[in-house]
Amino acid sequence: MPRIDRYILGQMLTLFGFFALVLVSVYWINRAVSLFDDLLSDGQTALVVLEFTALTLPLVISVVLPVAAFAATAYGTNRMAGESELAAMQAAGLSPWRLARPVLVFGVFVGLMVAVLVHGLVPLARARLADRQAELAQDVTERFLRPGTFQYPAEGITLFIRDIATDGRLLDLFIEDARDPASQTIYTSEEALVARADSGPVLILLRGLSQNLRQSGDQRSLAVTRFDEFSYDVGALFTGGDQKGRDLRDYGTLRLLGPDADLLAATGASAADARREAHERIAQPLLAPIAAMIGFATLLIGGYSRFGVWRQILWAILGLIVVQFLTNAAANQAGRDPAMWPVLYLPALVGTALCCGLLWLAGRPRRLKHRGAPA
């Protein structure tokens, strides 16, 4: 790599490290505060809070890196223009396309970092975070199973446990489910065990009785069923029944491109939804070099001004906003219709065309304006 390229690339990487550190800190602290309040209110320790905030870090970094790349190129180009370094390079015969080469290398480097995050670290962190949340949900549920008191974990639900044995068995359990006035059920059992399932904690009722009272108009019917073993989703009691399956974002990209039956059953999503999520990840790293090139190419337009290049900076910010707006619109369109996943690559194409157009404008020869002599 020529020395001039190494110089520009070194400038961009140094500024990128600074802006990435600042932006990641701001975003991470903002997310950590909400997690801190939620976890501490549930009685969790500081180590659990630290673990959860650390697991959100890869996602935060993947979102922040393209913005940091834009800020680094815009600030670095502005500084080189203010110190007449760009003017000297262009006077030496370097065209805007030639000057943009190290910036493109810088943008591709940032894009590779984003790709490693979105295809590797972010799914791993999200899967681990989902597992830890399920474990904490079960711990919270088990803490609610207190013996000797009537409890009301949800509207229409009454729960009573006479005692808890030393080995964890629940003795003489009573559950009344009156959420539906037309169909009320009472479960009683001699013993019960708390088991962990994919959907959350489950009560295994042993040697019990189920009494279901149905009402249809003026008619009432009572159905009594004895059972040796019966499973009851106790996690739904404490969460109001909103428990969902795994998220598509918890799985790797290759598995999403070819979703199997286990993945679809765990997430409740369709194969088209899984492929849309995979293509959204593939398209995300493409925005990093575009953000870097917009920050560089826009500032090359316009001649020297003692008032600085604040107008070009505003145009660069506007260009980045347009690309981000197209990204959000494409994601919304693909979310409504997964078959429209090709539109996810449209913002990258528009951003590439915008960068090429800006470099073309910057490379056009400028005509000097002459004032006519007074008659």
Image (tube, rainbow, N blue to C red):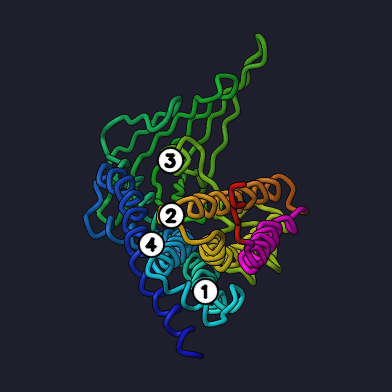
Measure how far apart labels 2 and 1 are at the Cα level. 56 Å
Does residue 26 belong to the magenta stretch? no
Amino acid type, residue under disc 3 in the picture: Ser
Count every numbered label the image shows and give the total. 4
Q: Position of residue 363 (x, y in %)?
A: 63, 69
Q: Position of residue 354 (x, y in %)?
A: 66, 59
* Residue name at image x 71 percent, y 54 percent: 270
* Residue name at image x 65 percent, y 67 percent: 365
Q: Position of residue 322 (x, y in %)?
A: 60, 49
Q: Which residue is mark 1?
A: 103
* Residue name at image x 59 percent, y 47 percent: 374
Measure how far apart labels 2 and 3 are at the Cα level. 16 Å
In terms of secondary structure, where does tag 1 sit?
helix
Q: Which residue is mark 3?
A: 189
Residue 334 visible in the shown view? yes
In terms of secondary structure, where does tag 2 sit?
strand
Please tell me how crowded label 2 is: few (under 14), some (14-19), or many (20+) other residues with Cα within 10 Å: some
Q: Which residue is mark 4?
A: 57
Along the line of sight, the residue nearer the viewer: 166 or 249: 249
Q: Which residue is mark 2?
A: 195
Measure how far apart labels 1 and 4 are at the Cα level. 26 Å
Asked whether the beta carbons under mark 3 and mark 1 sit within 8 Å of each other, the answer is no
Measure how far apart labels 2 and 4 are at the Cα level. 32 Å
